[in-house]
Structures are given as structure tokens and as C-alpha cells.
Amino acid sequence: MQDEYKTLDGSTVAFDLDDVVQVVKGHSQIKQGWQSFIVYNVPTRSFIELRSSPPDYKGNSADEAEEVTEQYVCATFQLEPAQVSTLRASPRKWQLVNRRG
């Protein structure tokens, strides 16, 4: 399944959702009040924040996808650099971390 995200340099890139590993879910610090889902794109070795806005009065919400840095992932979702190294070394063995609780 194809999707697009905005890279760190502002360009738009297509990616395959079948190629990503679910890393952590929580709340975005880029868009306050939005739900966040961080995925790791294995082919490009990049982190992508998939965001959803709070629903409006009709139940609709906006979605965005944007590349984020490893530093953002660690600072926002309390992942240790060693955990990120483990993820990069064996992405398919990673277990999703839930920070929405």
C-alpha cells in the first residue's frame, strides 16, 4: 500500500506501508493535541511520524506524514539511543512501544 510523506528537506516522497516497522505510538510534539504513530522505513532507514488531528464535530480528522529525526523520536517518546540501534540492526524483531497511556 503506497503513501507519501514530507522529507526533512521539504520534498514529498512515496513509500510502501508494507516496508515500515511500527516503532511507537503517542502524541506529537510537532502538532499539539494530535495522535502520533512513528514508523521506521526500512529501505530508507528513516523515521516517519504519521499524525492524526483530533476529530471535528462530524468525526473527521486530518492526517499527515512527515519524516522526523532520531533525536525527535528519542526525546518525544523516551526511547534510548541503544533501543534505536537495536531497531536499526533488526527492524523486524522490534516490538511496538505504546506511549498513549
Image (spheres, grey):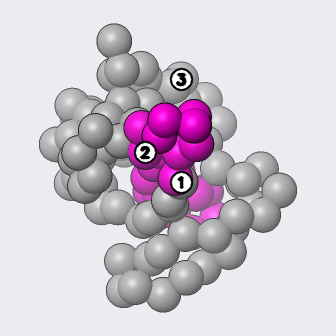
What's the residue type where badge 2 is placed?
Answer: Ser
| Secondary structure type for disc 3 | loop
Pointers 2 and 1 in contact (C-beta within 8 Å) = yes
Badge 3 is on which residue? Answer: 95
Measured from the top left, where is residue 65 in percent x and y?
Answer: 51, 60
N-terminal label among 3 and 1: 1
Badge 1 is on which residue? Answer: 63
* Front one among 42 and 64: 64
* Front one among 98 and 19: 98
What's the residue type where badge 3 is placed?
Answer: Gln
- Residue at the front extreme, as displayed: 57
- Location of the C terminus (image quadrant): top left
What's the residue type where badge 1 is placed?
Answer: Asp
Residue 8 shown left or right of residue 17 in the figure = left
Residue 31 shown left or right of residue 47 in the figure = left
| Disc 2 versus disc 3: nearer the observer | 2
Badge 2 is on which residue? Answer: 53
Quarter residue 22 falls in: top right
Task: Measure the alpha-carbon separation of dots 2 and 3.
Answer: 25 Å
